[in-house]
Image (cartoon, helix red, strand yellow):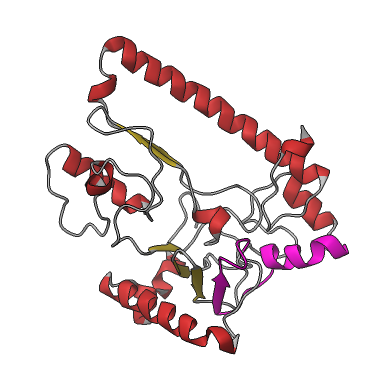
Amino acid sequence: RLQDARVPPPLPDAPEVRSDLLDYAVEIDWFNKQLGRMIEMLERSGELDNTFIAVTGDNGLPFPRCKANLYEWGTHVPLAIRWGKLKGGRTVEDFVSLADLAPTFMEATGLKPAAGMTGRSLMNVLQSGKSGWVDPQRQSVLVGRERHTPAQPDSPAGYPTRAIRTRDFLFVRNFKPERFPAGNDPVYRDIDNGPTKTFMLEHRNDERVANLFELGFGKRPAEELYDLKKDPGELHNLANDPAYAEMRKKLSSELDRQLKTWQDPRALGKGDEFDTYEYYGKK
Protein backbone atom coordinates (compact mmCIF):
# COMPACT_ATOMS: atom_id res chain seq x y z
CA ARG A 1 0.00 0.00 0.00
CA LEU A 2 1.20 3.53 -0.76
CA GLN A 3 0.90 4.55 2.88
CA ASP A 4 3.36 1.80 3.85
CA ALA A 5 6.20 3.23 1.78
CA ARG A 6 8.98 5.05 3.66
CA VAL A 7 10.15 8.00 1.57
CA PRO A 8 13.84 8.93 2.07
CA PRO A 9 14.40 12.64 2.89
CA PRO A 10 16.08 13.45 -0.49
CA LEU A 11 12.89 12.50 -2.36
CA PRO A 12 9.54 14.30 -2.51
CA ASP A 13 6.64 12.58 -0.77
CA ALA A 14 4.23 11.98 -3.64
CA PRO A 15 2.11 9.00 -4.76
CA GLU A 16 4.32 8.53 -7.82
CA VAL A 17 7.42 8.29 -5.65
CA ARG A 18 5.80 5.99 -3.11
CA SER A 19 4.64 3.67 -5.87
CA ASP A 20 8.16 3.63 -7.35
CA LEU A 21 9.64 2.72 -3.95
CA LEU A 22 7.14 -0.11 -3.53
CA ASP A 23 8.04 -1.47 -6.98
CA TYR A 24 11.66 -1.48 -5.86
CA ALA A 25 10.65 -3.32 -2.66
CA VAL A 26 9.00 -6.01 -4.77
CA GLU A 27 12.29 -6.57 -6.59
CA ILE A 28 14.10 -6.90 -3.27
CA ASP A 29 11.47 -9.35 -2.03
CA TRP A 30 11.99 -11.47 -5.16
CA PHE A 31 15.74 -11.52 -4.52
CA ASN A 32 15.20 -12.53 -0.90
CA LYS A 33 13.05 -15.47 -1.99
CA GLN A 34 15.75 -16.69 -4.40
CA LEU A 35 18.34 -16.35 -1.65
CA GLY A 36 16.13 -18.43 0.61
CA ARG A 37 15.96 -21.15 -2.04
CA MET A 38 19.76 -21.22 -2.31
CA ILE A 39 20.13 -21.53 1.47
CA GLU A 40 17.60 -24.38 1.49
CA MET A 41 19.63 -26.17 -1.21
CA LEU A 42 22.79 -25.85 0.88
CA GLU A 43 20.95 -27.15 3.93
CA ARG A 44 19.61 -30.18 2.05
CA SER A 45 23.10 -30.98 0.77
CA GLY A 46 24.55 -30.78 4.28
CA GLU A 47 26.88 -27.93 3.29
CA LEU A 48 25.13 -24.98 4.91
CA ASP A 49 27.34 -24.69 7.99
CA ASN A 50 30.42 -25.26 5.85
CA THR A 51 29.57 -22.35 3.53
CA PHE A 52 30.52 -18.74 4.18
CA ILE A 53 27.60 -16.65 2.92
CA ALA A 54 27.88 -12.87 2.46
CA VAL A 55 24.99 -10.91 0.96
CA THR A 56 25.34 -7.23 0.11
CA GLY A 57 24.69 -4.66 -2.63
CA ASP A 58 26.88 -2.65 -4.97
CA ASN A 59 25.07 0.67 -4.49
CA GLY A 60 22.15 2.31 -2.77
CA LEU A 61 18.64 3.07 -4.00
CA PRO A 62 18.47 3.75 -7.78
CA PHE A 63 16.87 7.16 -7.19
CA PRO A 64 18.01 10.82 -7.40
CA ARG A 65 20.69 11.80 -4.83
CA CYS A 66 20.99 8.13 -3.90
CA LYS A 67 22.78 5.71 -6.23
CA ALA A 68 26.16 7.01 -7.54
CA ASN A 69 26.28 9.62 -4.76
CA LEU A 70 28.21 9.60 -1.49
CA TYR A 71 25.24 10.31 0.75
CA GLU A 72 23.52 7.84 3.08
CA TRP A 73 21.12 6.43 0.50
CA GLY A 74 23.90 5.96 -2.04
CA THR A 75 26.60 4.24 0.00
CA HIS A 76 24.81 2.52 2.90
CA VAL A 77 24.07 -0.97 1.61
CA PRO A 78 22.97 -4.11 3.43
CA LEU A 79 25.49 -6.70 4.57
CA ALA A 80 24.36 -10.04 6.01
CA ILE A 81 26.87 -12.78 6.83
CA ARG A 82 26.31 -16.40 7.83
CA TRP A 83 28.83 -19.12 8.60
CA GLY A 84 28.44 -22.18 10.77
CA LYS A 85 31.46 -21.15 12.84
CA LEU A 86 29.91 -17.79 13.81
CA LYS A 87 27.26 -16.82 16.35
CA GLY A 88 24.15 -15.69 14.48
CA GLY A 89 21.20 -13.50 15.36
CA ARG A 90 23.31 -10.38 15.83
CA THR A 91 23.23 -6.83 14.48
CA VAL A 92 26.61 -5.11 14.21
CA GLU A 93 26.91 -1.34 13.78
CA ASP A 94 30.63 -1.09 12.88
CA PHE A 95 31.63 0.81 9.76
CA VAL A 96 32.46 -1.61 6.95
CA SER A 97 33.73 -1.07 3.43
CA LEU A 98 33.11 -3.60 0.67
CA ALA A 99 36.90 -3.60 0.31
CA ASP A 100 36.92 -5.40 3.67
CA LEU A 101 35.26 -8.49 2.22
CA ALA A 102 38.23 -9.86 0.26
CA PRO A 103 40.62 -9.95 3.25
CA THR A 104 37.77 -11.39 5.34
CA PHE A 105 37.30 -14.27 2.90
CA MET A 106 41.04 -14.89 2.84
CA GLU A 107 41.36 -14.99 6.63
CA ALA A 108 38.34 -17.30 6.87
CA THR A 109 40.18 -19.80 4.65
CA GLY A 110 43.42 -19.49 6.62
CA LEU A 111 45.20 -17.18 4.18
CA LYS A 112 46.85 -13.85 4.85
CA PRO A 113 45.47 -10.79 3.01
CA ALA A 114 47.40 -10.09 -0.17
CA ALA A 115 49.91 -7.25 -0.26
CA GLY A 116 48.36 -4.01 -1.45
CA MET A 117 44.89 -4.72 -0.07
CA THR A 118 43.50 -1.62 1.64
CA GLY A 119 40.53 -3.38 3.24
CA ARG A 120 40.58 -4.79 6.77
CA SER A 121 39.36 -8.27 7.62
CA LEU A 122 36.10 -8.46 9.57
CA MET A 123 36.96 -11.75 11.24
CA ASN A 124 37.67 -10.14 14.62
CA VAL A 125 34.18 -8.61 14.55
CA LEU A 126 32.48 -11.75 13.27
CA GLN A 127 34.17 -14.04 15.79
CA SER A 128 33.52 -11.72 18.74
CA GLY A 129 29.94 -12.91 19.17
CA LYS A 130 28.99 -9.35 20.09
CA SER A 131 26.32 -6.98 18.81
CA GLY A 132 26.37 -3.20 18.43
CA TRP A 133 29.64 -1.38 17.92
CA VAL A 134 32.28 -4.09 18.29
CA ASP A 135 35.64 -2.81 17.01
CA PRO A 136 36.54 0.62 18.47
CA GLN A 137 39.07 1.16 15.65
CA ARG A 138 36.29 1.28 13.07
CA GLN A 139 35.54 4.94 13.73
CA SER A 140 34.85 5.92 10.13
CA VAL A 141 34.61 4.73 6.56
CA LEU A 142 35.83 6.31 3.31
CA VAL A 143 33.79 6.23 0.11
CA GLY A 144 34.40 7.59 -3.35
CA ARG A 145 33.28 7.90 -6.92
CA GLU A 146 35.23 8.58 -10.08
CA ARG A 147 33.12 7.82 -13.17
CA HIS A 148 29.72 6.17 -13.33
CA THR A 149 28.29 6.89 -16.77
CA PRO A 150 29.39 9.14 -19.66
CA ALA A 151 27.07 11.91 -18.49
CA GLN A 152 29.08 15.12 -18.94
CA PRO A 153 28.26 17.28 -21.98
CA ASP A 154 30.70 16.69 -24.83
CA SER A 155 33.15 14.86 -22.55
CA PRO A 156 33.83 11.34 -21.24
CA ALA A 157 34.81 12.82 -17.87
CA GLY A 158 33.19 11.71 -14.63
CA TYR A 159 32.43 13.43 -11.35
CA PRO A 160 35.34 12.69 -8.98
CA THR A 161 34.37 12.90 -5.34
CA ARG A 162 35.52 11.39 -2.03
CA ALA A 163 33.99 11.38 1.44
CA ILE A 164 34.58 10.36 5.02
CA ARG A 165 31.67 9.20 7.17
CA THR A 166 31.74 9.05 10.96
CA ARG A 167 28.91 8.31 13.37
CA ASP A 168 27.97 11.98 13.58
CA PHE A 169 29.19 13.63 10.38
CA LEU A 170 29.61 13.24 6.65
CA PHE A 171 32.29 15.29 4.89
CA VAL A 172 32.38 15.30 1.08
CA ARG A 173 35.02 16.72 -1.24
CA ASN A 174 33.99 17.30 -4.86
CA PHE A 175 37.15 17.66 -6.92
CA LYS A 176 35.39 19.10 -9.99
CA PRO A 177 32.47 21.20 -8.71
CA GLU A 178 32.11 22.88 -12.08
CA ARG A 179 30.84 19.60 -13.52
CA PHE A 180 27.35 18.11 -13.37
CA PRO A 181 27.15 15.35 -10.72
CA ALA A 182 24.00 13.88 -12.26
CA GLY A 183 24.78 14.72 -15.87
CA ASN A 184 23.54 17.70 -17.82
CA ASP A 185 20.00 18.96 -18.39
CA PRO A 186 17.68 17.64 -19.79
CA VAL A 187 18.89 14.01 -19.75
CA TYR A 188 20.66 13.73 -16.37
CA ARG A 189 22.06 10.40 -17.50
CA ASP A 190 23.75 9.62 -14.19
CA ILE A 191 20.35 9.11 -12.55
CA ASP A 192 18.49 5.89 -13.31
CA ASN A 193 15.34 6.46 -15.35
CA GLY A 194 12.10 5.77 -13.56
CA PRO A 195 8.86 7.30 -12.23
CA THR A 196 10.61 9.25 -9.45
CA LYS A 197 13.09 10.88 -11.81
CA THR A 198 10.29 11.71 -14.24
CA PHE A 199 8.13 13.17 -11.47
CA MET A 200 10.94 15.40 -10.20
CA LEU A 201 11.77 16.61 -13.70
CA GLU A 202 8.13 17.45 -14.42
CA HIS A 203 7.64 19.21 -11.06
CA ARG A 204 11.05 20.80 -10.67
CA ASN A 205 9.50 24.25 -10.21
CA ASP A 206 6.91 23.16 -7.65
CA GLU A 207 7.53 24.55 -4.17
CA ARG A 208 7.62 21.10 -2.57
CA VAL A 209 10.08 19.72 -5.13
CA ALA A 210 12.33 22.62 -6.17
CA ASN A 211 14.88 22.37 -3.34
CA LEU A 212 15.09 18.57 -3.55
CA PHE A 213 15.47 18.81 -7.31
CA GLU A 214 18.41 21.19 -6.95
CA LEU A 215 20.06 18.91 -4.37
CA GLY A 216 19.65 15.84 -6.53
CA PHE A 217 20.19 17.23 -10.02
CA GLY A 218 22.15 20.48 -9.65
CA LYS A 219 25.83 21.33 -9.27
CA ARG A 220 27.49 21.10 -5.86
CA PRO A 221 30.16 23.07 -3.98
CA ALA A 222 33.72 21.82 -3.54
CA GLU A 223 33.03 20.79 0.05
CA GLU A 224 29.98 19.51 1.89
CA LEU A 225 29.50 18.83 5.60
CA TYR A 226 26.43 17.33 7.25
CA ASP A 227 25.57 16.98 10.94
CA LEU A 228 23.90 13.57 10.97
CA LYS A 229 22.34 13.95 14.40
CA LYS A 230 20.53 17.15 13.47
CA ASP A 231 20.18 16.44 9.76
CA PRO A 232 20.05 12.67 9.07
CA GLY A 233 18.65 13.39 5.62
CA GLU A 234 21.86 15.26 4.70
CA LEU A 235 19.98 18.18 3.20
CA HIS A 236 21.74 21.16 4.86
CA ASN A 237 25.37 21.74 3.93
CA LEU A 238 27.33 23.22 6.86
CA ALA A 239 30.75 23.43 5.21
CA ASN A 240 30.72 27.25 5.36
CA ASP A 241 29.12 27.51 8.80
CA PRO A 242 31.64 29.06 11.27
CA ALA A 243 30.21 26.94 14.07
CA TYR A 244 31.42 23.82 12.27
CA ALA A 245 34.78 25.16 11.07
CA GLU A 246 36.84 22.96 13.40
CA MET A 247 34.94 19.81 12.49
CA ARG A 248 35.24 20.58 8.77
CA LYS A 249 39.00 21.07 9.18
CA LYS A 250 39.38 17.86 11.19
CA LEU A 251 37.49 15.67 8.74
CA SER A 252 39.13 17.29 5.74
CA SER A 253 42.58 16.57 7.18
CA GLU A 254 41.71 12.97 8.00
CA LEU A 255 40.30 12.41 4.52
CA ASP A 256 43.45 13.87 2.95
CA ARG A 257 45.71 11.78 5.18
CA GLN A 258 44.02 8.52 4.31
CA LEU A 259 43.74 9.23 0.58
CA LYS A 260 47.42 10.13 0.39
CA THR A 261 48.33 6.98 2.30
CA TRP A 262 46.52 5.03 -0.40
CA GLN A 263 48.16 7.26 -3.07
CA ASP A 264 44.82 8.34 -4.48
CA PRO A 265 45.76 10.42 -7.56
CA ARG A 266 43.05 13.00 -6.86
CA ALA A 267 44.48 13.69 -3.40
CA LEU A 268 47.93 14.08 -4.96
CA GLY A 269 46.78 16.76 -7.39
CA LYS A 270 46.52 14.34 -10.29
CA GLY A 271 43.79 12.06 -11.60
CA ASP A 272 42.78 13.80 -14.83
CA GLU A 273 43.95 10.69 -16.68
CA PHE A 274 40.86 8.95 -15.33
CA ASP A 275 38.78 11.22 -17.55
CA THR A 276 40.49 9.93 -20.69
CA TYR A 277 39.90 6.22 -20.21
CA GLU A 278 37.55 4.77 -22.79
CA TYR A 279 34.20 3.34 -21.73
CA TYR A 280 33.72 -0.24 -22.87
CA GLY A 281 32.38 -0.22 -26.40
CA LYS A 282 32.78 3.55 -26.76
CA LYS A 283 35.43 5.75 -28.30
Q: Is residue 62 above or below residue 238?
A: above
Asked if one can make out residue 136 in the rendered structure from this viewpoint, the answer is: yes
Rendered residue at 55%/80% (across/down):
222
**Left or right side of 192 for 186:** right
Asked if one can make out residue 68 in the rendered structure from this viewpoint, the answer is: no
Q: Is residue 210 magenta?
A: yes
Q: Nearer the viewer, residue 89 or 84?
A: 89
**Left or right side of 217 for 36:** left
* Residue 65, percent from left and from top: 63, 59
List the single residue furthest toward the top.
Answer: 44
Q: Is residue 93 above or below residue 213?
A: above
Q: Quadrant of the N terminus?
A: top right
Which image quarter: residue 217? Answer: bottom right
Which image quarter: residue 95? Answer: bottom left
Rendered residue at 41%/67% (across/down):
274
List the single residue furthest toward the right.
Answer: 206
Rendered residue at 38%/64% (across/down):
140
* Residue 216, percent from left and from top: 67, 62
From which residue to which does the magenta span run? Answer: 204-233
* Residue 113, percent from left and from top: 17, 50
Rendered residue at 31%/72% (across/down):
258
Q: Is residue 72 magenta?
A: no
